[in-house]
Image: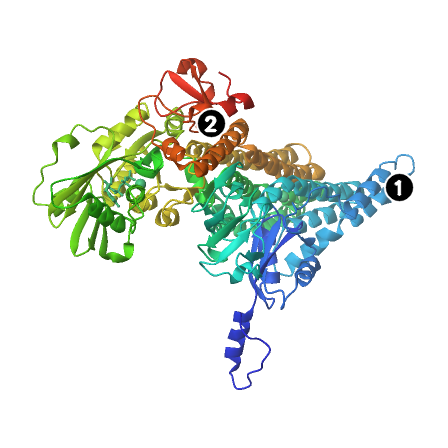
Amino acid sequence: MMGGGESYPALEASLLAEEAAARRQWEKTYLDVLGVCCSAEVALVERLLAPLDGVRAVAVVVPSRTVVVEHDPAAVSQSRIVKVLNGAGLEASVRAYGSSGFIGRRPSPYIVACGALLLASSFRWLLPPLQWLALGAACAGAPPMVLRGLAAASRLALDINILMLIAVAGAVALKDYTEAGVIVFLFTTAEWLQTLACTKASAGMSSLMSMIPPKAVLAETGEVVNVRDIGVGAVIAVRAGEMVPVDGVVVDGQSEVDERSLTGESYPVPKQPQSEVWAGTLNLDGYIAVRTMALAENSTVAKMERLVEEAQQSKSKTQRLIDSCAKYYTPAVVVLGAGVALLPPLLGARDAERWFRLALVLLVSACPCALVLSTPVATFCALLTAARMGVLVKGGDVLESLGEIRAVAFDKTGTITRGEFTVDMFDVVGQKVQMSHLLYWISSIESKSSHPMAAALVEHAQSKSIQPKPECVAEFRILPGEGVYGEIDGKRIYVGNKRVLARGSSCQTVPERMNGLKGVSIGYVICDGDLVGVFSLSDDCRTGAAEAIRELASMGISSVLLTGDSAEAAVHAQERLGGALEELHSELFPEDKVRLVGALKARAGPTMMVGDGMNDAPALATADVGVSMGISGSAAAMETSHATLMSSDILRVPEAVRLGRRARRTIAVNMVSSVAAKAAVLALAVAWRPVLWAAVLADVGTCLLVVLNSMLLLGEGRGRRGKEEACRATARSLEMRRSQLAAVSPDAATKSVGKTGGDAPKGCHCCHKPSRSPEHSVAIDVRVDEQREGPTAATCAPAKKVEYSSSCVSAGCCSP
Ligand SMILES: Nc1ncnc2c1ncn2[C@@H]1O[C@H](COP(=O)(O)OP(=O)(O)OP(=O)(O)O)[C@@H](O)[C@H]1O
Ligand SMILES: [Mg+2]
Ligand SMILES: [Zn+2]
């Protein structure tokens, strides 16, 4: 980056420091830190590492016991960081790149020694001096606890280690050595088991951590360069089996790419020139040259990674409440404990030992470990599951809101429908202009717009061998909810819906033949005040849209449609969905969408908005949960939304809501059971006899249960997908073969990519993959109701004839 090495004696110290900071190469180190248990250690870790020179940021992820340090390896090495942490007894180690943390970890020698001595001491009925071994057991297991306790105490923090040590000391003072040994053993073993349980979570986390290679190969020179130094527009080579290092567009070659890291589904996605590829996805089987579209640090996967990390650190409402109480809580408990131990004997109570034990039980039971863990572990697991199924949720709060959703507002174009328009009709009106001119003007203006309709119009012109020249467009404006305006060759041109007609033209008579058209979006072209062209566009419903809405309905959630498109187009979509939507609102401006979402919130309760376009962004922000569609959706929508569907699969919407509900339930169960366990032990102690080891068991046991219960969330949402994934995989490679076929004979390609028309839904009924060319599909005459099997089988409109792609039938996932 900068020319280092020279010295600048004339420069001021501050400048030097600035330059040093700029020269720094920041790197992220992931550490497994076993000693991180509650939020008490978070502050400890931060206070230990933050003051080190060369450390820029420290993040502690409690549930997976991971510490992420962003540092300059030249100033502070990994081993130094590990040493500092271990100095406080935190048992830190550097996680190897891509390794999955704690797998196969054995118990520490302290635990083994403690357990062995305790076992030996149990033979004291044979040989009474053996009871001293129990004391030995307590001492053998204690060192990590002591180290951590000391580190906490030196920062005036009272943590679980100190509470446990007080209990151990108390038991020793009562000459109950076995009890002391048992406490240490239970505590350390539970900690270890908890760590094992976290294995799964941390494995998931590292699979999420991008595996972007640090180097890339320039296609032209073959030079190997650092990914960070690649600018936008460079062409890099990606061979089979390699990760794509930067977001970009394929300029040469063909391949299949596994986008699992982004979409959560692993099946090969065919790529050819013009296809977009994303960093962190795996190039499976061919060579591709990629022109970069973003700097490495701005690639989608890097943004995603940052989001997931931030989400883990951002605390949810529930957690903030617990944390703010914890500050006053622990000192209060210590005072109370001292009172219970000292006051009754001072007031003349006879059984001083009993009161002392009761105080110890109180102290141990007061440890809020399980309660403190109840929210973050569950949130973490749920966020991880969400990310793995291709839903990027920006934080625990969003997750909690997801579970409360009562109504969903869907945008139409690009959300319910694919947003891949085909031009059905394109006509010149009047004698004023020629078709070729019209196409040239429109495509040039539209190539500046990112609306899905624009892409279709540009493509249409290109198919008529007319190349757009965006550089010839003098003035360009987007008219929200209407269309676009541009000046080209001195002409003032409007393209858009009938609002544009009212705006730009004096004559407002719509050509006769446009009136009878159903289910299409109609567009008008106005040139210098005259209507000169009309066109109609159509778009298909996304597969799974109807099913998603029905699933939401079965969960008691109502769905409405909010669209900027015409009423006819909205009604048509509703028909294709089999009337699943409860309300349709059409011809909306962006601010209308905001208003309607607000109204829905007031009427139905917590509301979700799902959308993809720029015109959806304000509504997404207004909703309780705004969900944006896909990595290829508009950037504005993705920025303002609270969650993003990476794979544009609308079925993820009900899945995400279900996950949110499960997470809320899990948190509630965690909190209730951790409080209940403590209450039970205290009641037992007061009513019968204070049993110290039972209190410890209840404490560490509930911690473990809370973790395990939260882990159940990790399995959520995967089962149903397995079968489908296999099916889609075969369908995908089918698609690939078809596109290869298309490359050989372009004629067949245009035919096979043509739009689906008619009433019968086309495509494999099982995997929703289009199977339009007859040689790839078999048509089977069955009634839809009879073969509908579970909620996965549904298309936009029910029909008699259902197609299966032949590969699916042979793969055995469709059973006609
Ligand atoms: N670039 C464009 N070219 C032609 N027509 C356009 C363009 N942009 C918008 N329009 C017209 O304006 C209408 C409203 O656009 P808007 O972006 O508000 O909604 P939409 O994206 O079509 O629908 P939805 O809100 O369901 O996503 C469109 O239906 C279309 O008729
Ligand atoms: Mg839209
Ligand atoms: Zn605890």
Which element type, helix, strand or loop, lies under badge 1? helix
Residue 753 locus on image (x, y percent): 38, 33
User: Foreground mark, 1 or 2?
Assistant: 2
Determine which residue is flagged by label 1. 130
x and y, in percent, of residue 346 in the image? 66, 48
Q: Amino acid at mark 1?
A: Leu
Q: Amino acid at mark 2?
A: Cys
Q: Please identify the quarter of the rendering in which residue 810 is found.
A: top right
**Residue sitting at 50 percent across and 49 percent down?**
301
Quarter of the image holding residue 577? Answer: top left
Along the horizontal axis of the image, is 513 left or right of 734? left
* The image quarter in which residue 601 lies: top left
Query: Looking at mark 2, is its residue's CB closer than 8 Å to ligand 2?
Result: no
Q: Which mark is residue 767?
A: 2
Q: Position of residue 529 (x, y in %)?
A: 11, 48
* Residue 631 visible at all: yes
Seen at 12% across and 36% down, the residue is 510
Residue at 53% x, 69% y is 1
Other residues around mark 2 within 10 Å, as few (<14) / some (14–19) / many (≥20) = many
Q: Can the viewer see residue 313?
A: no
**Position in image of residue 774 (x %, y %):** 43, 23
Of all residues shown, which one is farthest toward the bottom?
10
Marks 1 and 2 sit apart, C-alpha to C-alpha, by 68 Å
Helix, strand or loop under label 2: loop
**Which of 66/327 is in front?**
66
266 over 81 or under it: above or below: above
Front one among 756 and 34: 756
